[in-house]
Image (cartoon, rainbow, N blue to C red):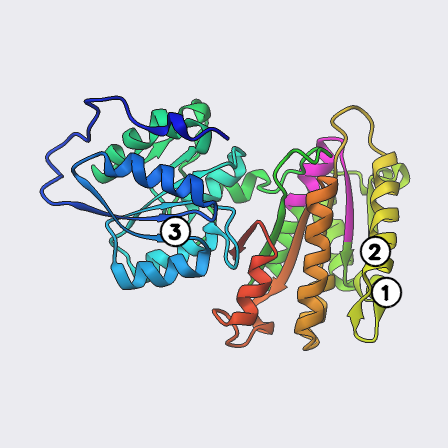
Amino acid sequence: MDFSGLSMTSGSSLKGDYVAHLVRVLVVDDFEPWRRAICSMLQKQPELRVIGEASDGLEAVHKAEELQPDLVVLDIGLPTLNGIEAARRILKLSPQSKIIFVSQESSADVVQRAFGTGARGYLVKTDARRELLTAVDAVLRGEQFVGSRFAGHDLTGASDARAPESVRSSGVLAPLQQNTGLPRRHEAGFYSDDRSFLDDLTRFIGTALRAGNAVIVVATESHRDSLLPRLQAHGLDIAAAIEQGRYIPMDAAETLSTFMVDGLPDPARFVKVAGDLIAEAAKAVKGKHARVAVCGECAPLLWAQGQAEAAIRLEHLWDDIAKSDGVTILCGYPLGSFQGAVGSSIFDKICAEHSAVYSR
């Protein structure tokens, strides 16, 4: 990517009488050349001062707590802790900070989740040269800013710790087409109760099936049984989808037994099992935009059994699938199984294996 074009045209500056003092900015991105380019762009404006930089999500949270910046320019695809979760933590520790996401992610679903953290702005990296200072100006005046490429979409939604209702009701996890050039979609939901979990699974599965796609559901027997009436109540013919091969229900414990060796997932066995399942599902969908989605509880089941290392390794293997095969993945964790582990290093490792995390 060419960063030379990021310098602003001469004479451009922030507007508004809100600039009564220097605006203190924290810049967060794991790609150093991009981070330098953003810092250079911002520091050409006399009203802005970059007071810190961070290259991963946890570092961003710690620096935000220490520096209490006025503004945080934040990427989403960060190591150790993704930007969505980092934003939530930053706003708890530095509530006066305003957050602008500058990310490669251009999915409307991702933008909605970003605003659901309480962020005030979102733009795509390729538009930063034209739009970053406009976004900063708007956000510092108390407005929300959405990049021009999202014109016509209502993406700002509610700004609290949960995903906005518009996301939750419309199927936030619509599967991606099988295209390795697309960003990975491997998400984790942390649920306070079964109802919230089943609500999200119903939306996830329903979105995929209505689009003509295939879904592999790897869950406990009770959850699989509970899903059927919910899906049917939404007008979905699950019997037909099963017959077509577009709805593949699997038992989580039985599936784990096919690739676990000495208490840990065996990579070769996992690739064979997951690969065969995905290939089977892919045969049932037609057209050049054929898609496959996977949702379930294999890693969460390991976690609930006290096998944290096995759960992390399994999430890493699923993440490789998401990256290589373009499969959308949703993992559902019961919050009760963490019992105080939220915020710990082991919890952060689970989060780091996902492209986005959220709680219900």
The mark nearer the N terminus, 3 or 2, is 3
- Residue 263 versus residue 234 in the image, above or below: below
* Mark 3 element type: loop
C-alpha span from label 3 to label 2: 35 Å
Q: Residue at x 43, y 55 (%)?
A: 86
Residue identified by numbered label 2: 250
Circle 3 is placed at which residue position? 160
Residue 197 in the image, given as x and y percentages of width and height:
62, 57
Q: Is residue 192 visible?
A: no
Q: Position of residue 157 (x, y in %)?
A: 41, 39
Identify the magenta region: 203-217
Q: Is residue 197 magenta?
A: no
Q: What's the amino acid at mark 2?
A: Met
Q: Nearer the viewer, residue 283 or 86?
A: 86
Assess whether residue 209 is covered by the magenta stretch. Answer: yes
> From the viewer's perspective, is 360 left or right of 146?
right
